[in-house]
Amino acid sequence: MPQLRSVADPREPSRAPYLVKLAANAAVLALTFAAVANAQAPQPQTPTADPTPEVVNPRLMFREVVDETGRTVRIAQPVRRIVSLAPNITETLYALGLQDLLAGDTDYCDYPAAAKLKPKVGGAINPSLESIVNLHPDLVLVTKSLNRLETVRSLDHLGIPSYATDPHTVQDIISSMERLAEMLGAQQTGATLGQEMERQLAQIEQRIAPMPTARVLFVVWREPLISVGTGTFIADALRVAGAKSIVDSTQSWPQVNLEEVVRQQPDFLVFAESHPPSSTPESLDVLADLPGWRILTAVQNRRYAIVSDAVDRPSPSIVSAIENLARQLHPEAFEEKPLPAAKPDSPTAPENPAPPASSPSASRLLACAAAKPQDRACAL
Amino acid sequence: MRPLTLRLVLLRCLTLAGVLVVVVIVALKLGAVQVSLYGLTRDLLQVFLHHASSLSSNYGMIVLDIRLPRILLAIVVGASLAVAGTSFQALLRNPLADPYVLGVSSGAALGAIVALIAEPRLALPASVAALFTPLGAFLGALATIAAVYFLGRREGQIDSGTLLLAGIITASFLSAVIMFLMTTLTGRDLRGTAFWLMGDLSSSLQPSLRWVLGVGFVIASATIYASAADLNLLLSGEKEAMHLGVDVPRVRLVVYVAASVLTGLAVSVSGAIGYVGLLVPHVMRLLFGSDHRILLPTAAFGGAIAVVIADTLARTVVAPAELPVGAMTAMAGAPLFIYLLRRRMA
C-alpha cells in the first residue's frame, strides 16, 4: 500500500489539494520569519518572571521531559498557563480538572461546553501564533495526528515549549493522559481517571468476550468512501468494542474501493454522528437505493451503528463511545443482568451523565465520558 | 484535406468505438474481484434479456452494480470533457483552453462545499439531501460560467482575450474563497470536500441522476455538433466567418452554453478531472485533422477511452484502496502535453 504522505508528516492526513497545503505552508513560513524577527526582542516567555518565589531550589523550576514524538521539551514547573491546540487535549484537561490552567484553545474545542468560552487561538491546523504568544503560555499542548510540525517549529523559535501527544491505541490514550496528568501536577487525578477507564474497558471486554467479533466498515466519509487504517486509534477502539475493521491499510485514512467492501460483506457499517451528510437513521435510508451500497447485506438488513463523535477524539470519553458501539454491535451481551461491578442501571437504557462534581475525579470522568449517551442501535 | 464524407466519419467513429469496447471489457474484468470473461458475458446477456433477477452470484452483482455503472459514468464524463474542451478551444481560438479554463471547476467545487456546509443545517428530506451536493456543484458551475460570460464582454460582444482573462481571474478568486472555507472547516470535512478538486468517479449515482446526466450529455453534444461547420469557419477568424454568413454571436452563445452545461454536468458528478479536455482534442486533431465535424465525435470517443483507462488504473493500482482519477490523468497528461508541445516546435 503506497503511503501518499511522508511518514514523518505530523499533519492530519487530510486530502487537501496540494495548492491549499502550499498556501498554508507559505503562510506558516511567513509567520516563522516574523517569529525569528521577534526572537531578537526580549523573550516573551521568561518563566523566571514568575513573581512568586515559592520555588526555593532553582533547579526544580524546569524539568526536561520527552514527549510522545521523541522530542525533549524543557517545561517550567509548575505549569501555570497552557494553550491547547487540539480538541482531544482540551477535553483531557477538563477531565483532569485542570481547566483553570487552560489559557486558550482552538475554534474546534467545543467539548465540554465550557471549553467554548476559553480564549481562541484559531484552528488546529492554522492557529494564530500571535494569539498564542499573547496568552503567555508556559506550555502548548499539541497532538501529532492533528497539528502540524510547522506550528511546533514556530513555537520553538518563539521559545514557547510544546509537548506533543501521539496515541495510536486506546491504551495509548490512557497512558498519554496519565503522563500529561503527571507532568501538570495532577498525578493522583490522572491515576484515578486511568483506573476508572481501565475498569470500564475491562467490564466491556468481559461482556463481549463470548461474542464473535463483528466485521465492520467504519465510514469516515461516504463519497468518496474513506475509512480508517489499521494504525489508527479508531481501529483499536473498534477492536476493544468487539469489532474488526475490514479495511487492511497502513494509510491512516485510506480511500476504499466499494467492490472490496462488497466482497468482504461487513456485518455492520459504523458511522460517526456528525458524518456529513449527517448520519441519522433516516439519512442512511438512501443507501438502500444506491447502486453498489444496496448489494451490501449490512445495508439490506439495516445493520448500521451510529456512534457519538467522541469516537473521533483520542480523549477519555473514547470509553463511552466504545461502550456505546459495543452495545449496538453486541446488544445480547448487554441484555443479561448487570455484572456485579456494574452500576445498577437498566441494561438497555442509556446512562445518565453524572452531575459534574468537584471531586472525586472518577465522577468527573463519568460526567465527561457519558457525554452523549445514546442507544440508537438500528440493528435487527 | 480530403473531402469529408459520412462514410469517413462513421468509419473513424466505429474504429474508436471498437477500441472503447475493448477498453471497457478489460476495465470490467479488472478490479478488486476477479471475474472470468465467460461469467461476464453470461451475466451481461442475462441483463440484456431482462433476467437480472436471476443473477445470484455476488460477483456478478459487483460487476453490474458497481463496476459497470462506474465505467459508464467514466465514458459520459470523459466524452463530455473532451467535447467541451474541443468547443472551448475553437471558441476561444486558444490551444490552452480546456473545460476548466473559465473557472467552472472552481465554481463547482465552491457550490459543492457550500452545499456540504449548508446541508446538515437545512434538515432536508433524505432523498433531496442526497442530490443536494451535486446540485450545488452544478449551480456553482453554471453561475460561474454566467458571471464569466458577462465579465468577458466588450461593447456587447464576446472577446476571446477578455473572456479568458475573466475566467482565469474568476477561477483564482473562487479558489481563494474555497481555501478560506476549507481552512475554517474541520479536518474531517476537508477530506470529503477535496474530492471536488481532485476528481473522483467512485460515487454511486442516484438512478435519477444518471438519467439527468445521460440526457443532458446527448442534448448538449448534439447542439454543439449542429454548429460544427460554423466552428470550422470561426477558426479562420471572426470577420471571415461573418462574411461567410455565420451568425457569429449566436453560434458563440449556443456553443458556449452547451459546452458549459457539459462541463457542469461532468464536474458535478466527478469533481475536476484535469487534462482530458485539454489533451484529447489535441491528440484527435493530430490523428484526424481539425474539421470539427469529425473532431467532435472522435474527441468524445477519445475522452471516454482516456477516462475509462485512467479510472481503471485509479481503482486497481493500489487496490483495495483507490487513487483519485484526477491524479492519474494529470500524471499521464502533463508529460504527454509537453511531448506534443516539443514535437510541434521541432
Image (cartoon, grey):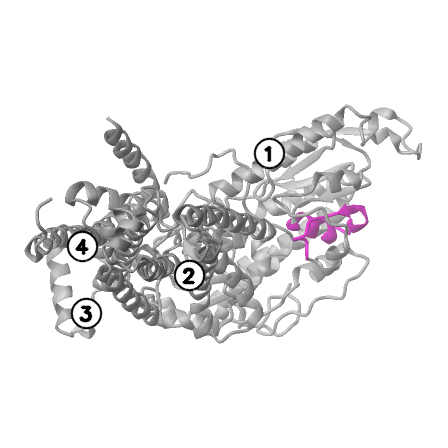
The structure residue drawn at horizontal position 42% and vertical position 53%, both measured from the top left corner, is: B105
Provide the residue designation for mark 3: B55
Amino acid under disc 4: Arg
Callout 3 environment at 10 Å: few (<14), some (14 to 19), or many (20+)?
A: some
Question: Residue at image x 82%, y 58%?
Answer: A358
Tell me the element at label 2: loop
Q: Amino acid at mark 2?
A: Pro
Q: Earlier in the sequence, mark 1 or mark 2?
A: 1
Q: Say whether residue A269 is left or right of residue B317.
A: right
Q: Do callouts 3 and 2 point to residues on the same chain?
A: no
Question: Are the residues flagged by discs 1 and 2 from a single subunit?
Answer: yes
Query: Which residue in the protein does label 4 denote?
Result: B293
Q: Which portion, as a residue range, is magenta?
A: A87-110
Q: Nearer the viewer, residue B302 or B60?
A: B302
Chain of the residue where label 4 is placed in the rendered structure: B
| Label 1 – label 4 distance at C-alpha | 63 Å
Q: Which mark is nearer the camera, 1 or 4? A: 4
| Discs 3 and 4 share one subunit | yes
Q: Is residue A184 left or right of residue A56?
A: left
Q: Which mark is residue A69?
A: 1
Point 65% across, 53% down: residue: A108
Is the Cβ of the residue at disc 3 closer than 8 Å to that at disc 4?
no
Disc 3 and disc 2 in contact, CB within 8 angstroms:
no
Question: Does residue A57 sit above or below B199 in this rendering?
Answer: above
Distance between the alpha carbons at the discs numbered 3 and 4: 42 Å
Residue type at mark 1: give it.
Thr
Distance, label 3 to label 2, CA atoms, is 31 Å
Residue A65 seen in the figure = no
